[in-house]
Image (cartoon, helix red, strand yellow):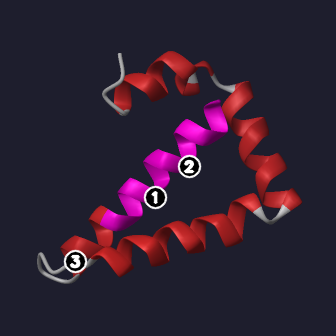
Amino acid sequence: MKLAAAGALMIMEMSQALWALRGGEFEFMDFVDGAHRFSREVEHSDGNKNCLEHILSANQAFSLKNFLAALGCV
């Protein structure tokens, strides 16, 4: 669950960064590209996925409650 919440936040942050770099220009396919890049780099790489899972479980700052709050779910 934490990995899913972290992924959603990272994709949102990457999209916001791209939007800012383009001066407020952003299309749906830019969002799709960001999600695809995240998937390729994290979800399809056992090393990267394991590293992220370790970081998320080792630090209380990355609690599920905090992730859900950041997503506006709590």
Task: Kindly identify the residue that appears in the image at 53 percent across and 37 percent down.
Answer: 5
Mark 1 touching mark 2, by CB under 8 A? yes
Task: Kindly identify the residue that appears in the image at 28 percent across and 63 percent down.
Answer: 16
Residue 25 as seen in the image, left or right of residue 72? left
- Amino acid type, label 3: Phe
In the rendered image, residue 43, in percent from the top left (x then y), is placed at 73, 59
Sequence-wise, the earlier of marks 2 and 3 is: 2
In this rendered view, identify the residue nearer to me: 43 or 13: 43
Q: Which residues are magenta?
A: 1-15
Q: Is residue 38 magenta?
A: no
Sequence-wise, the earlier of marks 3 and 1 is: 1
Q: Residue furthest right?
A: 46
Residue 37 as seen in the image, left or right of residue 34? right
Q: Residue furthest front?
A: 28
In the rendered image, residue 62, in percent from the top left (x then y), is placed at 56, 27
Question: Majority secondary structure of the magenta segment?
Answer: helix
Residue highlighted by disc 3:
26
- Amino acid type, label 1: Ile
- Amino acid type, label 2: Gly
Residue highlighted by disc 2:
7
Q: Residues within 10 Å of mark 3 (few under 14, many from 20)?
A: some
- Compared with 44, 63 (above or below) is above
The secondary structure type at the circle numbered 1 is: helix
Residue highlighted by disc 1:
11
Q: Residues within 10 Å of mark 2 (few under 14, many from 20)?
A: some
In the rendered image, residue 17, in percent from the top left (x then y), is placed at 30, 68
The secondary structure type at the circle numbered 3 is: loop
Task: Kindly identify the residue that appears in the image at 65 percent across and 30 percent down.
Answer: 1
Q: Is residue 5 magenta?
A: yes
